[in-house]
Amino acid sequence: MIRECLVCGKEFEACNTCLKGVPENLQWRRVVCCREHFAYHMPIILYVRKVMSKDEAKKELQEAIDNFGNVDFCSNIKDVVDEILADERLEKSEIADRNSKKNKTGSVEESTE
């Protein structure tokens, strides 16, 4: 059966005989094109299912990137990857900037960007 890799979108020949009693998303030959992409797939899936914290997912995803390089992620998971890899310090800085603006003007202006 031909499928699209859940990480990069590349078509690959999925294994239909791999471990029938194990959930499909836990078997790399059934959901991604190569073993390396499974290292990216698992923290994304576990984070989305709220089984893994953002910090844990970020650590594992960054480890995969460090070990195997950057990947052009599928458009349907790109936002999740960006959310996982977002720099917490930047997010806190943005909140502090908004609070600072609020204190100066009495209200927060909505951004139109």
Image (cartoon, rainbow, N blue to C red):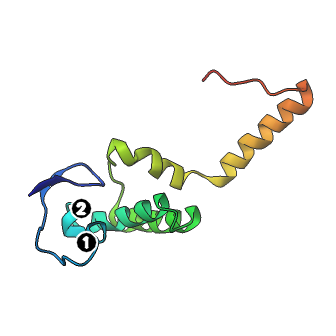
Instruction: Tell me the residue that label 1 is attached to.
Output: 27
Residue 57: image location, x then y, percent: 50, 65
Residue 30: image location, x then y, percent: 20, 65
Under mark 1, the amino acid is Gln
The one of 60 and 44 positioned closer to us in this rendering: 44
In the rendered structure, the answer to whether residue 24 lies left or right of residue 101 reads left
Asked which quadrant contains residue 111, the reply is top right
Asked which quadrant contains residue 2, the reply is bottom left
Q: Which residue is drawn at 24% across and 61% down?
A: 32
Image: 44 above or below 90: below
Quarter placement of the C terminus: top right
Q: Residue at x 30, y 71 (%)?
A: 26
The one of 2 and 10 positioned closer to us in this rendering: 2
Task: Assess whether mark 1 and mark 2 are in contact (beta carbons under 8 angstroms).
Answer: yes
Classify 10 Å Cα crowding around label 2: few (below 14), some (14-19), many (20 and above). many
Quarter placement of the N terminus: bottom left
The one of 23 and 38 positioned closer to us in this rendering: 23
Classify 10 Å Cα crowding around label 1: few (below 14), some (14-19), many (20 and above). some
Looking at this rendering, what residue extends furthest in the top direction? 112
**In terms of secondary structure, where does tag 1 sit?**
loop
Q: Residue at x 24, y 48 (%)?
A: 9
Residue 44: image location, x then y, percent: 42, 60
Which mark, residue 50? none
Instruction: Tell me the residue that label 2 is attached to.
Output: 31
Image: 53 above or below 113: below
Image: 20 above or below 101: below
**In terms of secondary structure, where does tag 2 sit?**
helix
